[in-house]
Structures are given as structure tokens and as C-alpha cells.
Amino acid sequence: MLLRQIKYFITVVECNSFTEAAEQCYISQSAISQQIRALEDDIGVKLIKRENRKFYLTDAGEYFYRYGKELLNRAEEIKRETYNIGKNNKLQLKIGYLNCYGGVELQKAIAAFYEKFPEVVIHILNGSHEDLYYFLRDSEADIILSDQRRAFSDEYVNLHLVYGKCYVKVANNNILAKKEIVTLSDLKRIPCILVTSKEQQENEQDFYQNTLGFNTKFLFARTLEEARLMTIANRGFMPVELIKEEQEKNGLLCRIPLYRGEKQIQRNYCAFWRKDNTNFYIEEFAKILQNLFKSK
């Protein structure tokens, strides 16, 4: 069984025509028919049932089409990776993450991935949700860890990781510090500190104001550490999403659950990558990351 024969079969199915498939593959119609018959002889079962000028797939043909396509895609990945190794091209994985993300899951995933694939050079980027979207769209990142703000697109793999519970962090001497929970109405008179680049300040404010319902003044920090220092200085509160319950290590801030009505607000965290850029290493890293979040 040759990969070329599988490719001919897949093309015939997707074109729904031997004639069009032959044109796409740059061979004659009779040649493509002969190759598919040879494939059927090699496997030992019929894949295509012919009736006059029409045809349809047998059950075996349906199965072979689905998994044969996966096999071809994997073969192309192996070919590209072999070429890169042979040409001494560095294998790379570009990972993006939210600049307000403070969990350890990403660190553990990168360490586990490197242990398994030391030949791959890992590049790290961070940014706001919009920054990450553009990194991915423009191929500056291969895979990103981000929150869901848009409807899922069919152009991307949208791998759900976890629902993060929403909290606010405030200084211990803040008027909110003694509350067991806070609501959006409790936050109206206290500035909200957001971590974002200068270019994305307007987009971040719009999301928190018009989508999440934060009705307050906004302040901006360039890094997570800067936002923490501003919060410790009692300049406002910092919204955070946590995957795992943990205590504040420095004892200078307190964390309070953020509620809407009777339920704590949650956010959906996912790994995203472009379907047309999928490769073995992206999928392996995504599996490692997903397993780490599942273990929570």
C-alpha cells in the first residue's frame, strides 16, 4: 500500500469525481482508477462501490477515508520534520500566554515538553488577549494559552483547559478586605487595575466594562508584578482568575471571590492554535498542558 494510492483515493472522495481527481493529481482517469483498484486488492476489500457513472463508499471505504486522511497528514509532518533535521534547521515552538496569567501549569508544561523533546527550541511570548490573537493569526505564535472572549472559530483548534474562578485582589488595609465575597456593585468606587500593553488598553477596558460589567475607573499596568505593586499601594483592585485555590505568599494582599448574583463568575481558559499550522509538537505540547490542568 503506497501513500500515493491513499492520496488518489482521498482526492477522488473529496472531489466526488474520478475525472476531477485525476486532473488535480495530474494523471489520467484510467490511471487513477487502476491505482485505487490496486489499493483495494492490497487491502483485500472494496472501498468504492461503482454504479454506472456514480459511486459511493462502502463502510470500509468510509473508515479508510477518515483514517487515511490522518495518515497522510502525519506523513507530511514527518517529511517536513525530517527535512528540517537534515538541513539543520532548528525545530521551534512559539508559545504565547496571557500577561495576567500567574499559574504554574504553563511552567510545568514547558519543563515536561523540553524533557521529552530537547531538540525543539522554545520561544515564549506574552501579551493581552488581543495581542495573543494577532500573534496567532500572524504566525508569530504557534500555540497560545488564553481566555475565551470570541465565539470559537473553525479556523482554529479551541482546546478547553479549565474554568477559572474570578476573584479580586486588594491590599489588606482596603475597605473591601474584610468581605467574604464582593459583587460588581461593591467595586464601583474603587479603580480596576488591568495588565495590558499601551496599545491594548482601550480593548481591555471595553471588555471588562461592556462584557463583564465593571462600572468603575480603570488603571493600567504593563506587567503582572507592576499590577501587584499598585494593588499593594492601595491604588485599586486587581481582577484575577485562579485555577487552583492558594494562599497569598507575601501576606500583603487578600483575595476575595467575585460574584454575579448567587454564583461566582468564571472564565473559560483554552489552548488555541491554527488548524493549518497544526504539527506534531504543537499537539504534544497541548496534550501535556491539558493533562496538567486536568490534574487540578
Image (cartoon, grey):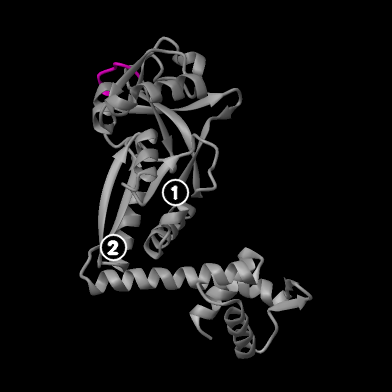
Residue receiving disc 2: 114
In this view, the residue in front, 68 or 151, is 68
**Label 2 Cα crowd, 10 Å radius (few <14 / some 14-19 / many 20+):** some
Say what secondary structure mark 1 lies in.
Answer: strand
Provide residue 16's location: percent of width, then percent of height: 66, 65
Locate residue 59 relative to residue 97 in the image: left or right.
right
Provide residue 176's location: percent of width, then percent of height: 41, 17
> In the picture, residue 287 is in which quadrant?
bottom left
Outermost residue on the top side: it is 189
What span is in magenta? 232-236
Locate residue 186 relative to residue 237 in the image: left or right.
right
Provide residue 117's location: percent of width, then percent of height: 30, 67
Residue 176 covered by magenta stretch? no
**Label 1 Cα crowd, 10 Å radius (few <14 / some 14-19 / many 20+):** many
* Res. 32 in view: yes
Residue 271: numbered disc:
1
Principal SS element in the magenta part?
Answer: loop
Residue visible at 65% across and 73% down?
A: 63
Say what secondary structure mark 2 lies in.
Answer: helix
Residue 235 covered by magenta stretch? yes
> In the picture, residue 75 is in which quadrant?
bottom left
Provide residue 159's location: percent of width, then percent of height: 50, 51
